[in-house]
Amino acid sequence: MKRVRVIVTWLLQILLGPLFVLVGVGKFAQWDGWVSRFEMWGYAPWFLGVIAVLEALGGVMVLVPRFAAYGAGLIGAIMLGGAYTHLSTGIGSPMQVAPQIVVAAAVLALRWPDRWRGSPKP
């Protein structure tokens, strides 16, 4: 059973990590389009830069076993903020970020016990 946990954990990390590195970097590549979205949602343009850096950082962290739980928590928090933004503004759907929240929560749950018990990391 431990082997299945290790495989599932790594598969989820490999799905989540590169995705968020690309999403974060992509926000810089398509800056003008993202600035208009952030302004439409009521956020200042500088906040886009913060979110882009945090998304890319979270993506990198998820790929490093020692930091994977923290990266997943960071990504989950950002995506919860995205869901709140969609709900509070009525622009877009919180379901757009639901899959990312679920995967981030799964990585967090699978990796976090390692932090507390000192068990070997998958």
Image (cartoon, rainbow, N blue to C red):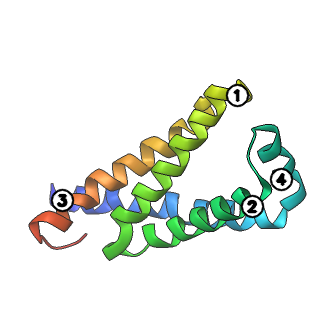
Q: Nearer the viewer, mark 4 or mark 3?
A: 4
Q: Nearer the viewer, mark 3 or mark 2?
A: 2
Q: Is residue 68 left or right of residue 120?
A: right
Please say if the residues under marks 2 and 4 sit with CB atoms less than 8 Å apart: no
Label 3 to label 2: alpha-carbon separation: 35 Å
Q: Earlier in the sequence, mark 3 or mark 2?
A: 2
Q: Earlier in the sequence, mark 1 or mark 2?
A: 2
Q: Is residue 52 visible?
A: yes
Q: Quadrant of residue 66?
A: bottom left
Tag 2: residue type?
Trp
Instruction: Name the residue beneath numbered marker 1.
Output: 89
Q: Earlier in the sequence, mark 2 or mark 4?
A: 4
Q: Is residue 50 left or right of residue 98?
A: right
What is the secondary structure assignment of the residue under circle 2? helix
Instruction: Name the residue beneath numbered marker 2.
Output: 46
Please say if the residues under marks 1 and 3 sit with CB atoms less than 8 Å apart: no
Please say if the residues under marks 4 and 3 sit with CB atoms less than 8 Å apart: no
Q: Earlier in the sequence, mark 1 or mark 3?
A: 1
Q: Earlier in the sequence, mark 4 or mark 3?
A: 4
Instruction: Name the residue beneath numbered marker 3.
Output: 113
Label 1 to label 4: alpha-carbon separation: 16 Å
Tag on residue 35?
A: 4
What is the secondary structure assignment of the residue under circle 1? helix
Rendered-image quadrant of the C terminus: bottom left
Query: For this rendering, which residue is in front, 54 or 16?
Result: 54
What is the secondary structure assignment of the residue under circle 3? helix
How many residues crowd mark 1 within 10 Å: few (<14), some (14–19), many (20+)?
A: few
Label 4 to label 3: alpha-carbon separation: 38 Å
Q: Nearer the viewer, mark 1 or mark 3?
A: 1
How many residues crowd mark 4 within 10 Å: few (<14), some (14–19), many (20+)?
A: many
